[in-house]
Amino acid sequence: MKSLKMGLLATALFSSHYAAAQSSDVQALQNEVKMWQPINIQQQKTIITITLNENQITPQIYHAVISDGICSGIWLHSTPDDFLKSIKEIRVLNKHSYQGYALTDPLATCNEMGMAQDENDGKTFMLSHSRLFTNKDS
């Protein structure tokens, strides 16, 4: 009985820590991408989905959200130190949550983009870590 209580306590502590870490990434993203007026930002384990009020996510919209929104917060140190450390993928989707793009390993990708010699190199690096996404993929 004692080991069951300890297990439940450990699970509760882990869950509350996980929820706090989850909400800090989502809260920071809400601030970083607010100019695109997202409909929703949600996290499921290591994937964050940003749903924009757009019929279609174009390459230009995707690039702007990633470079001018998400990555700029990292480059300018306006996000928490642990921002996106546990995130494996960020999806930027249209208002129907059907179509968009997914960026893999966003923290490392942003850091590499920030060290690029020019914007085209950074964009190329971003695209090499991106893929088209439809809700059939999930």
Image: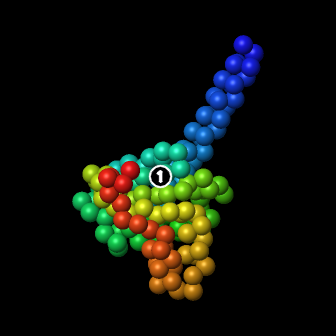
Q: Specify how the rendered protein is coloured.
A: rainbow
Pick the residue in front: 102 or 32. 102
Q: Circle 1 sits in a helix, a strand or a loop, which is it?
A: strand
Q: Which residue is drawn at 54% across and 63% down?
A: 106
The answer to whether residue 119 is seen in the rendering is no
Which quadrant of the structure image shows residue 10?
Answer: top right
Residue positioned most to the top:
1
Pick the residue in front: 95 or 87. 87
Tally of numbered tags: 1
The picture places residue 52, in percent across and down from the top left corner, at: 34, 56
| Dot 1 amino acid type | Ile
The picture places residue 61, in percent across and down from the top left corner, at: 35, 69
Q: Which residue is drawn at 66% across and 57% down?
A: 81
Which quadrant of the structure image shows residue 36?
Answer: bottom left
Q: Which residue is drawn at 65% across and 35% down?
A: 14
The answer to whether residue 85 is seen in the rendering is yes
Kindly identify which residue carries mark 1. Answer: 48
